[in-house]
Amino acid sequence: MTTKYLLREDQIPRHWYNILGDLRSPPEPVLHPGTKKPVTPDDLAPLFPMALIEQEMSAQKEIPIPEEIREVLAKWRPSPLFRAHALEKKLGTRSHIYYKYEGVSPSGSHKPNTAVAQAYYNAKAGVKRLATETGAGQWGSSLAFAGQIFGLAVTVYMVKISYEQKPYRRSMMQTFGAEVFASQTNRTNAGRKILEADAASNGSLGIAISEAVEDAATHDDTKYSLGSVLNHVCMHQTVIGLEAQEQMKLAGEYPDVVIGCHGGGSNFAGIALPFARDKMNGKDVRLLAAEPTSCPTLTKGVYAFDYGDTVGMTPIVKMHTLGHEFMPPGIHAGGLRYHGAAPLVSKLVADGLVEAIAYPQKACFEAAVTFARTEGIIPAPESSHAIKAAIEEARRADAEGKTRVILFNLSGHGHFDLAAYDAYFAGKLEDYEYPKEAVERALTTLPLVQA
Amino acid sequence: MTTKYLLREDQIPRHWYNILGDLRSPPEPVLHPGTKKPVTPDDLAPLFPMALIEQEMSAQKEIPIPEEIREVLAKWRPSPLFRAHALEKKLGTRSHIYYKYEGVSPSGSHKPNTAVAQAYYNAKAGVKRLATETGAGQWGSSLAFAGQIFGLAVTVYMVKISYEQKPYRRSMMQTFGAEVFASQTNRTNAGRKILEADAASNGSLGIAISEAVEDAATHDDTKYSLGSVLNHVCMHQTVIGLEAQEQMKLAGEYPDVVIGCHGGGSNFAGIALPFARDKMNGKDVRLLAAEPTSCPTLTKGVYAFDYGDTVGMTPIVKMHTLGHEFMPPGIHAGGLRYHGAAPLVSKLVADGLVEAIAYPQKACFEAAVTFARTEGIIPAPESSHAIKAAIEEARRADAEGKTRVILFNLSGHGHFDLAAYDAYFAGKLEDYEYPKEAVERALTTLPLVQA
């Protein structure tokens, strides 16, 4: 009985997979928020180093991973792929369930895969400091680590209510050497404007983004860094799926279905895009994105041009969106509370290559507890959506009398989310219906009328 | 440049190393707390299943690890061995620093290595429930996981002040399916006695041990389980050192010094005992236990017969002790706050095979932050003592113009200890002098006059 499939350090992928080069019809261009014309590399230069802008727009199918990045990834990559024998036994399923585990990274999720790459290219371009936002803190702690490794200062604008409610993520960022501010701050015009209007505001991811972008745009030595959504971010995450493909070969199986939870899209893209390439080449594989019913971007959103942030400062992209003014309910899977979706994933959904499904949070926590008690890993609330989907796929296969091979990405551990588990056990978690009216209202604010 | 040395799943050790079979002079017998005569297996039978009692007293040098245990260990074992390239570079040392990382386990430390074995033998003996105590929660969460795997109920008496101050460790135990009580409770005579005297008592590990032992002794289907100190516990941990020996071969080096932090002794024994065998066979290797100056059992204690617990209910063992009534200061490395030491480690210290050194906590946190910022892992405060010792060994080698190979055991991550890091950054940590008078007072209460 084999429990886990490991690759050697020299099997860390040598190229990222850039699906942009393989799409039959190109995605819609990204538009400038002011002119509403396609952005140029120069438009993005105040925020990102040119190497990342080139990756964002590249049609090269494989982009080499510099050795300096592979050496840092080697601290935890290749990440393990597990066969969930104990979970299968508990479910009594005849299906085979595999999971790729990204919680072995410094911050405990997949986020450092791109944080390390972004810090590397910024450092190489002479940038001295990175500014970013973070909600629950997963992304901030990943960039803090990566910045430290490449000698970059990191400034994190952490949503104020998270800063107060999740002090340990803040401590982690500080331990990794970042400076962390509760956003809104009086360090930026955006922050001061909010403070003047409401000094006691809890903050929001939208405000924190505005602060980080302003910080980067107004300091010559500083760039901005984003942890999801963008093409280059999704591409950096493809190491997950590329490794998983090799590991599934070791297991002697090929997945019938590949599952990831979906918020901004980076962890889903990471596991799914290399399999999407197989699918485009004729392979029979389903790709399934699992999202919360309370923020059902892919299952209930429209495929339309919208802003990436709440306040409308970022470029306008074509994506599945619930409207940039939509404020999702306060579920514990903070990383899935995003009104939009990665344009790449959205395109694949629109093209019928990717399916999506939504689950309420209590069912996801129930699946997470079953998983913890069998596999010995307490999952992040975000990742629990993928677990729930995997369990449902196994049950469906059993009902159909089929044996299926199910692969999901366990994007992170839940060591900093145990208060949410407490709430679950105490019966204090709420399930939220699809917030239909709020979405309908938000969708009236789309910046462009769709063709 | 190789960062980590991995073994295959089939390289999980097939035997534990039992150093009892190799010691030239046998350790002193364990004495009954009432009669003060050597204990018999029957004396221990109310608390432990016979298979573990046999292991506790066995002189067989290698004891086979049942396949059922190896299959569970395979969830995280063999654990990785890292070369600390980034730390070496930061220190500017010419020495080579390696660390074995036990934080990849379900509870995040080395503790599940023995929890799984203990749960297995108890389940095999028909036991239905395990009772144990826990301070900070590392041990309790490890046993909760192991009990869940083998279908045993687990009852954890958690020191009341930890129960209140470390709610996330409690949540982790509950997520793994254990019932957790804030000790003292009104479930036991021991607990009720304390509650009558002082209803607001914070509890202590001594009281929690008394409650767990009483629970086990008074229920036919229930046994007691201990996470350190005992011979069989130390033996179960030797998988750490046995794997490390194979991994050092992959690295093409042999350590000049092997380091572990030391509280009860189980993680130190785990990394050191297999190398102690080499040393007894003539190999030139130093074995170094690193402990806190505030609880300097090996460096300042006496080698004498003493109780394992605070209240004097457990068997009397010969060990390094600060006196069972000694109450260590409240340092953040809770796992190192123990008045005694494993009899096996004590014997090796007395025989001159193991050295010990003590460090104050602020210097250990400083070392931990340096480690986190280079290696990307935030260490448990306990493990930081081993890091500090490794850094000091490297500095000493540099001062002597030598290149040494240094191996230490990173016994766990600090994801549940970030409040301690906060206190460190805020300048709120205290260093404690060697509590000479308290120790002298405690040593007057030893149960036997020494020969």
Image: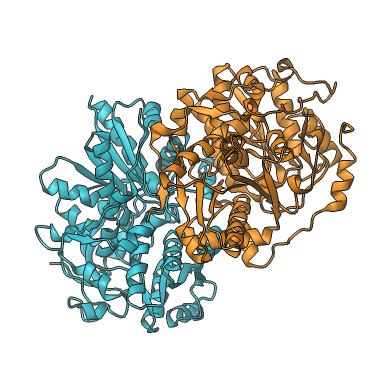
Chain colours: A cyan, B orange
Quadrant of residue A399 within the rendered picture: top left
Q: Say left or right for A346 vs A339.
A: left
Q: Say left or right for A422 vs B221.
A: left
Residue B324 screen position, x and y as percent: 81, 39
Q: Is residue A156 above or below residue A95?
A: below
Q: Measuring 73% from the left and 21% from the top, which residue is drawn there? A: B218
Q: Measuring 39% from the left and 56% from the top, which residue is drawn there? A: A335
Which residue is nearer to you in this view: A447 or B33? Answer: B33
Counting labels gives 0
Q: Say left or right for A414 vs B354.
A: left
Q: Say left or right for A64 vs B365.
A: left
Which residue is nearer to you in this view: B157 or B444? Answer: B444
User: Where's the C terminus of chain B, which quadrant?
Assistant: top right
Residue A55 screen position, x and y as percent: 23, 67
Quadrant of residue B320 within the rendered picture: top right
Q: Is residue A409 above or below residue A45?
A: above
Residue B236 screen position, x and y as percent: 57, 31
Camera sees residue B398: yes
Give the residue furthest to the front.
B282
User: Where's the N terminus of chain B, which quadrant?
Assistant: bottom left
Residue B260 screen position, x and y as percent: 61, 46
Which residue is nearer to you in this view: A393 or A449? Answer: A393
Q: Measuring 47% from the left and 67% from the top, which residue is drawn there? A: A158
